[in-house]
Image: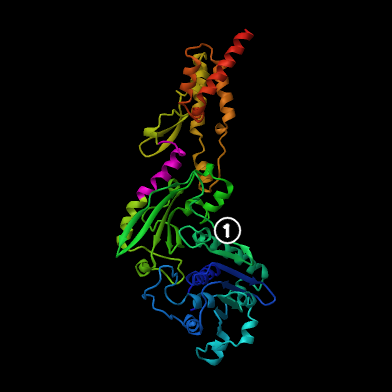
Amino acid sequence: MRAVGYSLRTALADIVDNSLAARARAIEILFESGPTPYIAVLDDGEGMDARAAREAMQLAGRSSLSDRDSSDLGRFGLGLKTASLSQCRQLTVVSKQSSTLVGLEWDLDHIAQANEWSLNVLDLDEIEVVPGFARLAEQESGTLVVWRRLDRLLEAGGDSADHLDAAMVDARDHLSLVFHRFLSGDDAPRVALSVNEVSIDPVDPFLTKSRRTQASRKEDIAYQGAAIEVRAFTLPFINKMTRRERELAAVAGALRDSQGFYIYRGARLVIWGTWFRLMPKSESGKLTRVRVDIPNSLDHLWSLDIKKSSAVPPAAVRARLRELATTMAEPGRKAISFRGRKAAEEDAVIRPWELVLDRDSFRYGINRNHPMLGGFVDGLEPYQVAQFDAVLRVLEGTFPVQDLHNRMSNDQVSSQATEDLAELRAALQSMWASTAVRRETVEGFVERMVGHEPFDLLRGEQQSLISALQEQEAERATAR
């Protein structure tokens, strides 16, 4: 039982599941590193009477196939026991319901000595010294789960208080993601969750508060009388994210690793950052995340494990998810390939760099027809034009494609000077001033230039640009 494979973070998440099933609206996680370490989870839920508490402490006290309330996050009737005993040798549960107070305890050392499954029933004196009980006593109802003799956790850290502190920070980050919809009240009852009186903030992997995030319409997959809801989100291009947004989005260590399906069961995140081998993870898909909400009535079909950290969709659902994933990932691919602009076949903007596709490869070439280059070579001697073209070919041939790929794969943000609008305006004025022979009006020049990258970023400022260039022309005429 202790070797099921729980980590501290997944074990705590299982205890929080029980609190949510008890309709708790405030859940406190308390821990003490020394001299007698413990971890406690206190909720303000409905609490349990003596019979319910004894059933909760029973192994597999409820069939995984029995009907459950849609908000019930349990399944096997094992979570409280397996999660707790994977971390400690002494599990104490104290629950309060109206005037009823009950305390029960599994003590592995006592069981080993008695050589039988002997459940300890605590009297009032024993209950009152349980860590966290004073807080429970102040509530109308609720349940307190306490782990003591943290042998597995302390063995891993060499009895180090710093190790427990670090493990709890990791657990906090995990809970902020797994229960983010409860913490924000997103299609779930809003719940306050804290660690040692410090509130846990939600980590939204879809950045839904960003106005640049694109959300698809919802799709429903009907299966065995239940509805599986699917919705895709395309994150903003990385250069458009704030530092905080990049930190929130990298839930699996990097944006590329964080793409894929996010499976929710009762608004609780179960598994994330996987395409279930329906499509490969790619650089072009790293901005795509697909939210899938499954009801707990389909648990057995999704091969949901005891820890609720793994799930596999049934074959019929996989087929539909494959179709939806391909379509839903397309906006993300366009955002990566064209930085949020229109695709090449629809794109009227002329760019300085061109993608050149060879038979089995690609390369980037400099567009010789871009007006900045055309204006530069005007008036040059033929041999100078040839020398300039040779320089361009060297630049094209040494374009650092591999380094660029490596940096973007590590979610490094590029800073493009051409996106400084003030610099673009100055460059446009400089080009107009250096034009030797006027072949067009100011209006025609501005209209032509905003059709070329990077000056297309100034497309909404044509009239002010025209006025500035006309003023500049008048000053030049006066000077002459």
Q: Residues within 10 Å of mark 1 (few under 14, many from 20)?
A: some
- When asked about the image quadrant of residue 60, the answer is bottom left
Against 177, is 82 above or below? below
- The amino acid at mark 1 is Asp
Q: Position of residue 208 (x, y in %)?
A: 49, 50
Where does label 1 land, which residue? Answer: 201
Mark 1 secondary-structure assignment: loop
Q: Position of residue 287 (x, y in %)?
A: 46, 48
Against 382, is 364 above or below? below
Q: Kindly tell me whether residue 1 is visible in this rendering.
A: yes
Q: Position of residue 189 (x, y in %)?
A: 49, 63
Q: Residue at x 62, y 71 (%)?
A: 30
As for residue 250 lying within the magenta part, the answer is: no
For the stretch drawn in magenta, what is the main secondary structure? Answer: helix
Q: Nearer the viewer, residue 163 or 441?
A: 441
Outermost residue toward the top in this view: 480
Q: Position of residue 61 (x, y in %)?
A: 43, 81
Q: Which residues fall within the magenta stretch?
A: 326-342
Q: Nearer the viewer, residue 118 or 42?
A: 42
Is residue 411 shown left or right of residue 154? left
Q: Nearer the viewer, residue 142 or 265?
A: 142
Is residue 112 shown left or right of residue 69? right
Q: Kindly tell me whether residue 157 is visible in this rendering.
A: no
